[in-house]
Amino acid sequence: MDPRESKHLHDTIGFVGLRAHATAVGLIQLTTELVDAGVLDASALARVKEKIAQDLCLNRPAHTSKATFERQTRERLDRLFCGKQPLAPMTVAAGAKAT
């Protein structure tokens, strides 16, 4: 999907209101169920997480470098989908103010 299509999808999902926690919880549960049932393999799960990361990176805070934000986002998604590590707020770049 090219960047314009990604942005359009991002905006459309936001307009529908699918940024809610309940939607995210449902997606994680659905993905877990599909992996457990053998419907999704590791590469499919990686593609799902990559699409989520790409969308989240569209709204990267200006005070955070692109590389840092992308790395932290992917690490957080890995922790979220495996359910083994607690999540904490993202770190703020040195010298930047948290918003």
Image (cartoon, grey):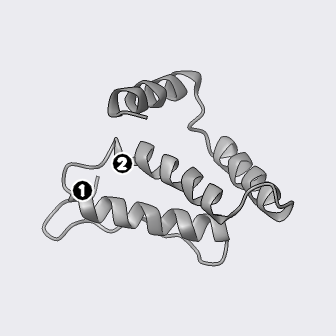
Q: Which residue is mark 1?
A: 66
Rate crowding at label 2 as few (under 14), some (14 to 19) or many (20 or more) other CA atoms within 10 Å. some
Residue 57, image x, y percentages:
36, 48
Q: Can residue 90 be seen in the rendering of this structure?
A: no
**Cβ–Cβ below 8 Å for labels 1 and 2?**
yes
At horizontal 27% and vertical 65% (from top left) the residue drawn is 68
Residue 31 appears in which quarter of the rendering? bottom right
Marks counted in the figure total: 2
Q: Which residue is mark 2?
A: 57
Residue 23, image x, y percentages:
67, 41
Asked if residue 28 lies left or right of residue 72, the reply is: right
Amino acid type, residue under disc 2 in the picture: Cys
The correct choice, above or below, for 2 with respect to 66 in the image is above
Residue 30, image x, y percentages:
77, 50
Residue 66 appears in which quarter of the rendering? bottom left
Asked if residue 10 lies left or right of residue 42, the reply is: left
Residue 65 appears in which quarter of the rendering? bottom left
At horizontal 42% and vertical 33% (from top left) the residue drawn is 6
At horizontal 38% and vertical 30% (from top left) the residue drawn is 7
Mark 1 to mark 2: distance in Å? 8 Å
Q: Can residue 73 be seen in the rendering of this structure?
A: yes
Amino acid type, residue under disc 1 in the picture: Lys
Q: Secondary structure at mark 2?
A: helix
| Front one among 64 and 6 | 6
| Front one among 11 and 99 | 11
Residue 64, image x, y percentages:
22, 58
